[in-house]
Image: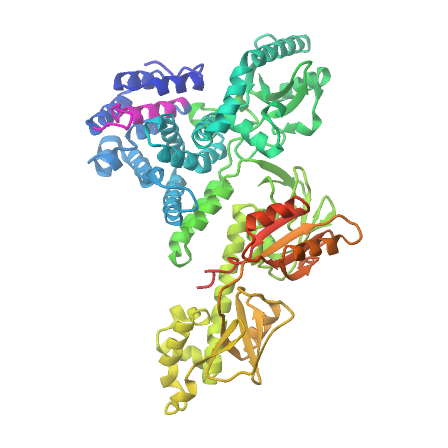
Amino acid sequence: MKPIDEEILLEQLIEEIYECKDLQKAQELLFSLCPESESIQKAVNFCIKAHEGQQRKGGEPYAVHPILAASLVAYLSSNETMIIVALLHDVIEDTPHSEEELRNEFGSEVARLVHGLTKIAEIREDNFNSKFSKNLTKSALTFRNMLLASIEDVGVLVIKLCDRLHNMLTLNALREDKRKRISEETLVVYAPIAHRLGISSIKNYLEDLSFKYLMPDEYTQIDNYINSNDQQMQLGLNEFISKIELLFLKNGFRQGSFEIHKRIKHNYSVYLKMQRKGVSIEEVLDLLGVRIMVQDVSECYLALGILHTHFNPLISRFKDYIALPKQNGYQTIHSTLFDTKNIIEAQIRTFDMHKVAEFGVAAHWKYKEGGAGVQTPKLDWLNDISMRSANNIENPEDYNAVELYEYAKDSLYIEDIAVYSPKGEIFTLPRGATVLDFAYEVHTKIGLHAKTAYVNRVRVPLLTELKNGDIVRVVTSNDKFYRCSWIDSVKTGKAKANIREFCKQKIREINLQVSIGVLANIFNESHEIINAWIEKEHLSRKIRQVSIDSAYFKDVVNALKKYAKKSYLFDRYELKEQKFDNIKVISNRKYTNIDFDFCCRPKKGDAIVAFSNAGSITLHHKLCDKAEKMLEEQAPMVFVEWSGTTLKSYKLIFSLENKKGALAEFLTNLAKMQINVLSINVSNEPSSIADYFEVHIELPENIEENVFKERLKNRYKIVDFTSLNDAYNQQGK
């Protein structure tokens, strides 16, 4: 009946779990972390019996895995139900036992949670490499199930993280390709989920283990450096801690009222820092650190004052997450200090904040009461993703599992910035987020109607990248701005998903209007009459397809001929094809001329619509404002589509040095590379400033996209480089 030992360090527990290969030791480890209650012992016995005869790839009895996963859950939580669920999490999936049996033996809550875990079990067999679309789709579907299961109880995710951590500790038994596949999945999905739940203790292990298998050379380089310099670094930290302790005791702290722990940044965090800053490991400033824990918030600021009085701080690295907590509940003051020999990061927090930082959402299960002022993780991101999941299931016609998966990944970002509304409200966004991301974060309607923006009272483009502490004001109008080609320029999953959804919805509406308009022109009838014919033929559900599918268009015309006024002259409705350069026209009328309207300048591959007037056809981009007005006025329409191969076109947003001839030089360099410039603008946005230019280009076949992009980056400041070939594909069916 031993209670949870609060002094057990996760590092020691991980080591014991890694070494444990037999059932007896696994049970001893579990019951060193939780009371040996009748219910938990019953679940252990059921688990062992259910998995009897099964072995893992490493040769140990299979039941060792759920018992050790349950041990990790017990480290995070004293909740008995969660520990039991962890013990039984593979029973339904891998044994003949049913959910009904679990309900009878352990109750409905246990059965429900095990069922939730079973729904997502196959995710670990998926391949998360986006090069393989079939596997990505499967991953997205099972990932959706994981999120749906977590709607009812976030404990499902906590148990899944512990299950995944034990799997990562035993990856050596698997083939190399499986190790890499599971590691990629862990790094892409599970570690960010642990971060969002605020469970940093688990997140760090998941990241480092994944890093070890995905990039062994880089991992070894960092690990060797830390190990070879460990003694020197430990001595430096010990000396620094001794100085702090003396200073604290001289300046108001009592002996025993605070604790100071030394820390060395974990390997994957070091790697990210090296990549982000473009530095070697020797140049990583905050490789060494100390964590100072005190009794209350006022003592945090007292400790900060003592440190800044006696050590020079690197002000650019100062962050106060106590005043401005992260969304996952994390609260700590970060300050990087110059010691005599080292640069050391000091983290200051209360003991209660430390519990939340280590255990996150699980802290309220492990500790019955939080301290005053301690934040708990906000799960808005989980509700948002899960609601999107549920809505997609209710509307399967619009459902795209991969979109959901990409949305979820973007919503699990790790690097955050905090920005403010003019009223002082705080919004957390991913590093690299734009003003338009902020607009969508405030409210979907703000994003859709955003017209201009001001950052720190200076007018800026909507794609301006935000920095920590920026004050952002978005000005809206009554008009809607769909900005479909901007989908790759925004950073947050919320902005991407809403832009994609608005554009799908808009293009579906346009396709319906175009389909009716084209048919009305063929039969020389009103839109109302054409709609009545379509209803009689039960074609309403797929009628949008007429505007984008020439074969279906012909079928519908043939089906509606019988309703025509002069049915004996069916030949007047015979469709014929005419070609004008890259455009194919299908109609029962003859046209002599075709032009692209100057207002929207559609280029090859864009979604287009066509209007007819006295034997001539005018083309517009499908999302052109002028075309929208002509659709509302029911101007005569013609079916058109691109013929031949679509060239690869791109949108490039860049800024130039403010000097005479800079733009001319840029265009000359493009010409030397044989790049076809389709159009160039200062910006299409009313929020534009002259520093930014937007150019649409086509690349010749002999130039690779990545090579071209790198050549540009070496000479110019590139804000955005986006392929336009997929901007509207598959959005309006």
Q: Residue at x 60, y 56 (%)?
A: 651
Look at the picture and state if 51 lies above or below 255: below
Q: Residue at x 74, y 56 (%)?
A: 664
Look at the picture and state if 177 lies above or below 458: above
Q: Nearer the viewer, residue 100 or 667?
A: 667
The N terminus - image quarter: top left
x and y percentages locating residue 266 in the rendered image: 52, 24
Residue 536 showing in the rendered view: yes
Q: Nearer the viewer, residue 85 or 621?
A: 621
**Magenta extent:** 54-75
Identify the coloring.
rainbow
The reply to whether the magenta stretch includes residue 569 is no
x and y percentages locating residue 506 in the rendered image: 52, 63
Is 77 situated left or right of 434 in this image? left
Q: Quadrant of residue 254?
A: top right
The C terminus - image quarter: bottom left
x and y percentages locating residue 708 in the rendered image: 60, 50
